[in-house]
Image (tube, helix red, strand yellow):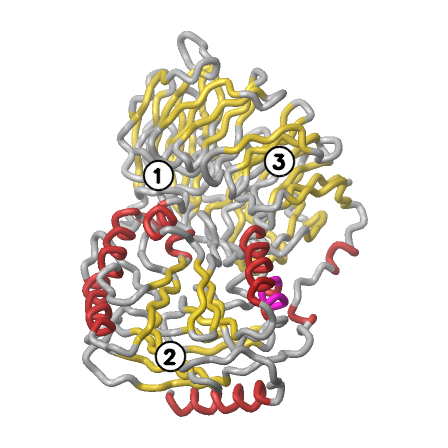
Amino acid sequence: MRRIFSVISLIFLAATSSYASCGSSVVAPFRFALLTDIHISSVNPTPLEDLRRSVDDINGQDSLAFVLVSGDITEAGDLRSMELAKTELDRLHIPYHITSGNHETTWSESGMTDFSRVFGSERFSFSHNGVFFFGFNTGPVLKMADGHVSPQDIKWMHRLLDSVGHHMTVIPVTHYPLQTGDVDNWFEVTDLLRRYNVPCVLGGHYHRNLIFNCDGIPDILCRSNLRGKEDTGGYSVISVSRDSLRIEEKRPGSPAEEWIAIPLTDTNYGKPDRSLRPDYSVNRQYSNVRELWQVRLGAAVYSAPAYADGKVYVGDEQGYFYCLSIHSGKQQWRRKTGSRINSVAAVAEGKVVVGSTDGNICCFNAADGTDVWTYETGKAVMGCPVITRLPGNGEQAVLIGGSDGCFRALALATGKQIWCYNGLKGYVVTRPCLYEDKVYFGAWDCHFYALNLADGSLAWSWSNGHPSDKYSPAAVWPVAADGKIFIVAPDRVFTSLNAATGEVVYRTKEHIVRESIGISAGGDTVYSRCMWDSVVAMDAHSDRPHTLWKTSAGYGYDHNPSMMIYNAGRLLFGTKNGLLHSINAATGEVMWRHKIGNSVLNTVCPVTSNTLLVSSTEGTVTLLSYK
């Protein structure tokens, strides 16, 4: 393996040396360490032992200037694991600079706010001996998808690199490599980096020493700190000289072994390879689809838009909650919450309700955005509210789950708590399903719940049997029909449960489904998107798995939890790479496709029988019409 990497090193040395030019800043030699993929767990002591050994080993060397930590600090993104990691990292005798990985961003009870609270920021930047380093989050955020660099982080990079200039050596630090299949908008970053003197990108994620060619730029991934099947874990030691960068693998108690070297010179990578870029030619095939307007909010959007009475409501990663005109997309009003919004709003009786990761459930006047009430929970609220009249007194209530172990009913008029079920062991991100006299939802605690609407008491709970919370039926928006509840979860099983008792009606692995589901207007058919190309329609009345049709929709591999929305005989859904689909709900025929961007499309929001709203992690909100 060392020989293979040596050959690769020579290739990169030869390729990049031909573009070397004069005028770079003078680099004084130094050495530093890189830790990545630490995966600290509050229930598994081994990763913590591996980190402790690496910290001790680093502290035993007197020639290291600092440590870079490039993501997947924890296994589950939980606060306790981050605190354990920080305690160990704080034992380092030298400074460390840290950014997050997908295990902090995909799963997070705090809505990814604890990382900044514990470590100070999701980004870093600093200079050392003539080299400028900066690190940033590559996502994905709070849902399964490809990695993504948010619009606000790209703006930050532009400002940062403009201030650094073109002559200083610059080394970016990420978790994911900047390439197709890992980061959906990698080209936005590499197009920026190639303007500067960037000899390579450093990262992790793949748990082993690798080098990728990311549109001409070397992207070097380093080994995980975990021991795996070995006796000890390890980390990387990187030596910077005036003309090269050399990387060694270091196991605690053993000599370091060099595995790659690249030149440290001004580098010109030539023009970008346009053949690698997203292909929008599909939009020429369907002239019946038209974008009426598109608004760029300037920050990533992780939740679906809501629509009522000529207005569009949506929140963004910076904590802003917007009201837009349905006619033009023009902003009507905007409110700021304390941190990112992942909740889909609900609107009723002139009020709009949304949760924020600042720990509050907010109710605004739908017309002008003034405060109606705020309910403080103490922890992030990522659940999506529904508004309904409760049995008995008929009071309009907001039903919503949070990260504080509670699912609540609040009075829509006043925000006063009507009831609370506090038996959850994990956080809620889903929109609950109302059916007959119960409310149904899953949480990231391996369980699916049914509560009695009248008083919030537990009717039943169900688990699919997986011990890991990563398999929880938590992201799916459940649907119900004919006395049954239908869910799909990361276990890739289509599940039907008795709505009254929670008993399993059936579970089938025939279709590889995951977290994306929908139901016809009459409740006769349940739909799900499979992980590879296909959409499946199941008979909602049958007590055994009965497939009505299955069709290939041509979207490739997809695991984005975007729900399938039935509207006027069509199924509407988006993918992780920006491709919107319309499918004939009766036959499975693909009616049209339209590519909006190359990043996650959230669950669509129908406006009329031939218009819809859709938001994306690129920070866009789009109104489309179709025939």
Q: Amino acid at mark 2?
A: Phe
Q: Residue furthest right?
A: 287
Q: Tell me where residue 554 sits by quadrant.
A: bottom right
Highlighted magenta segment, given as a residue range: 188-192
Number of marks in the image?
3
Q: Amino acid at mark 3?
A: Cys
Q: Nearer the viewer, residue 471 or 529?
A: 471
Dividing the image into 4 quarters, which one contains the N terminus?
bottom left
Q: Tell me where residue 23 sits by quadrant.
A: bottom right
Q: Is residue 184 above or below residue 267?
A: above
Q: Earlier in the sequence, mark 2 or mark 1?
A: 2
Residue shown at the point (41%, 43%) measured from the top left: 111
> In the displayed structure, does residue 175 sit left or right of residue 231?
right
- Crowd band around label 3 with a 10 angstrom C-alpha radius: few (<14), some (14–19), many (20+): many
Q: Earlier in the sequence, mark 3 or mark 1?
A: 1
1 within the magenta span: no
Q: Nearer the viewer, residue 609 or 150?
A: 150
Give the alpha-carbon distance from disc 3 to disc 2, as whole Å.
54 Å
Location of mark 3 (residue): 605
Q: Main secondary structure of the magenta part?
A: helix
Is residue 480 visible in the rendered image? The answer is no
Q: Is residue 315 above or below residue 240?
A: above
Q: Tell me where residue 173 sits by quadrant.
A: bottom left
Q: Nearer the viewer, residue 394 or 331?
A: 331
Q: Position of residue 463 (x, y in %)?
A: 30, 41
> In the displayed structure, does residue 120 sit left or right of residue 476?
left
Give the alpha-carbon distance from disc 2 to disc 1, as whole Å.
44 Å
Location of mark 1 (residue): 427
Residue shown at the point (38%, 36%) measured from the top left: 380
Q: Secondary structure at mark 1?
A: loop
Location of mark 2 (residue): 30
Q: Amino acid at mark 1?
A: Tyr
